[in-house]
Image: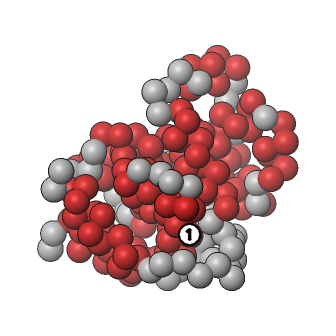
Amino acid sequence: MNVVDEVIALLEDSGGEQYFGEAVTKLAHAEQCAWHAKQAGADEELILASLLHDIGHLLDTEDSLRDERVGVINHDYVGRQWLLDRGFSQRLADLVGGHVDAKRYLTATNAAYMDRLSPASQETLRLQGGPMDAASAEAFAREPELRDMLRLRSWDEMAKDPNLVVPPLASYREMLLRHLNR
C-alpha cells in the first residue's frame, strides 16, 4: 500500500468515529479544517497539514499517551513523527507538530482565546500542559512557522460544525500525491 492510500484508509477507517466531545466525526473535522485552509488561500502544504493535523489520534504507537476521554494526548508529536517517517515535508510535519503548542501559546497570550475553546478543547489543553508560561510563549513566538501554526489552530477550532458540507477526503488525493512526489 502506498502512503497516499495508507493515509486515506487511516482517515476513512478511523475517521468515522466521533471527534472527542464535539458534534462531528474525526473525518469531518479533518475535512473541514482543510476546507477552511483552502478557503483562506493557504498553500498546499498548509492545506494538507490542516487535513492531517490530528492524524496522531488515529495511530496506536508505543509513543502514544492515550486518555479514553480525549484520545492521544501527544497526538501532535506522534502525528509529526509518523508523517516524517512516510516522506511528508519537514514544514508540513512541523505544522502538525505545532498545532497543540499554538493552542497553549494562544491561551497564554490572549485571555479571550480560552473562552472560545470548546469544553473538550479546554480539557485537552489541561492534559497537554495548559497555557504556556511566559518563557515558553516567548520562545514559541520565534517559531519560523508561527503565523501558519496559528492559522491552522484557528481552522482547527472552526472545524467542528455538524452542518457544514465540504469536499470529501478523496478530493485531496492528487494534492497528497503531488506533495509526496515533490
Q: Residue at x 70, y 46 (%)?
A: 126
Q: Which residue is mark 1?
A: 32
Q: Is residue 104 above or below residue 174?
A: above
Say if residue 54 shows up in the picture. no
Where residue 103 sits, quadrant-wise, is top right
Say if residue 4 shows up in the picture. yes
Q: Is residue 43 above or below residue 106?
A: below
- In the rendered view of the protein, which quadrant contains the N terminus? bottom left
Residue 153 percent coordinates (x, y): 60, 49
Residue 95 percent coordinates (x, y): 44, 43
Amino acid type of the residue tagged 1 in the rendering: Gln
Helix, strand or loop under label 1: helix
Q: Residue at x 30, y 64 (%)?
A: 175
Q: Residue at x 55, y 61 (%)?
A: 39
Residue 33 percent coordinates (x, y): 55, 63
Residue 16 percent coordinates (x, y): 49, 82
- Badge 1 crowding class, 10 Å Cα cut-off, few under 14, some 14 to 19, many 20 or more, is many
